[in-house]
């Protein structure tokens, strides 16, 4: 196992699953962009918010590929919605979804870039959110 592969697995185990904040400060560079702001604090803010909605959310590595200073992780997550998730009030429903996260590491082995995609639409469907297409002409088309 390469150093970046081990670091990526630790990032998921410690930060995503266990909420070990000290690990985020060891693994994430201060200027790493994230959804909740930059650096370890931004990453932790995003995961705190997600754990508030899904306290038992756990990620499982399905596949991991490391090459040079980059790691690609295909993961699967599952958890029960016990708190507010965006505009969706708590439902008590279990969600299960997949995603992929791409990490880039600096020379000291710290994460300097994170990019993820996931099945958010599936999560919302599992929570019972009704998704309706816009009415004809509702997207700026030449409707009447």
Image (spheres, grey):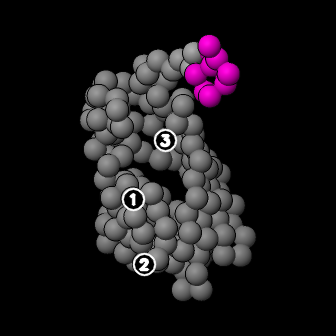
Q: Which residue is mark 2?
A: 30
Q: Residue at x 58, y 58 (%)?
A: 115
Which of the 4 image quadrants contains residue 39? bottom left
- Between 32 and 15, the residue placed more toward the observer is 32
Which of the 4 image quadrants contains residue 105? bottom right
Q: Is residue 133 left or right of residue 30?
A: right
**Label 3 to label 1: alpha-carbon separation:** 20 Å
- Between 2 and 130, the residue placed more toward the observer is 130
Above or below, comparing residue 95 to residue 110 in the picture? above
Sort mark 1 into few (<14), some (14-19) or many (20+) by Cα contacts within 10 Å: some
Residue 74 position, x and y percent, is: 62, 49
Q: Quick one: label 3 or label 2, which is nearer the N terminus?
A: 2
Q: Is residue 104 left or right of residue 67?
A: left
Query: What SS does tag 2 mark?
Result: loop
**Which quadrant would the C terminus be assigned to in this image?**
top right
Residue 23 position, x and y percent, is: 37, 70
Query: What SS does tag 1 mark?
Result: loop
Which of the 4 image quadrants contains residue 135? top right
Q: Residue at x 41, y 55 (%)?
A: 16
Sort mark 3 into few (<14), some (14-19) or many (20+) by Cα contacts within 10 Å: some
Q: Main secondary structure of the magenta part?
A: loop
Q: Which residue is mark 3?
A: 77
In the rendered structure, which segment of residues is drawn in magenta? 136-144
Q: Which residue is mark 1?
A: 36
Residue sticking out furthest to the right: 67
Mark 3, mark 2: which one is toward the viewer?
A: 2
Q: Quick one: label 1 or label 2, which is nearer the N terminus?
A: 2
């Amino acid at each position: 196992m390469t150093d970046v592969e081990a670091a990526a697995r630790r990032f998921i185990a410690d930060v995503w699953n266990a909420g070990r904040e000290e690990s985020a400060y060891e693994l994430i560079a201060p200027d790493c962009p994230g959804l909740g702001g930059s650096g370890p604090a931004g990453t932790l803010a995003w995961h705190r918010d997600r754990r508030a909605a899904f306290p038992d959310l756990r990620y499982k590595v399905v596949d991991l590929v490391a090459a040079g200073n980059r790691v690609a992780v295909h993961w699967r997550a599952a958890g029960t919605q016990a708190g507010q998730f965006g505009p969706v009030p708590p439902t008590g429903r279990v969600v299960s979804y997949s995603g992929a996260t791409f990490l880039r590491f600096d020379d000291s082995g710290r994460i300097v870039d994170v990019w993820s995609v996931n099945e958010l639409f599936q999560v919302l469907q599992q929570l019972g959110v009704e998704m309706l297409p816009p009415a004809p002409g509702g997207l700026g088309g030449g409707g009447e």
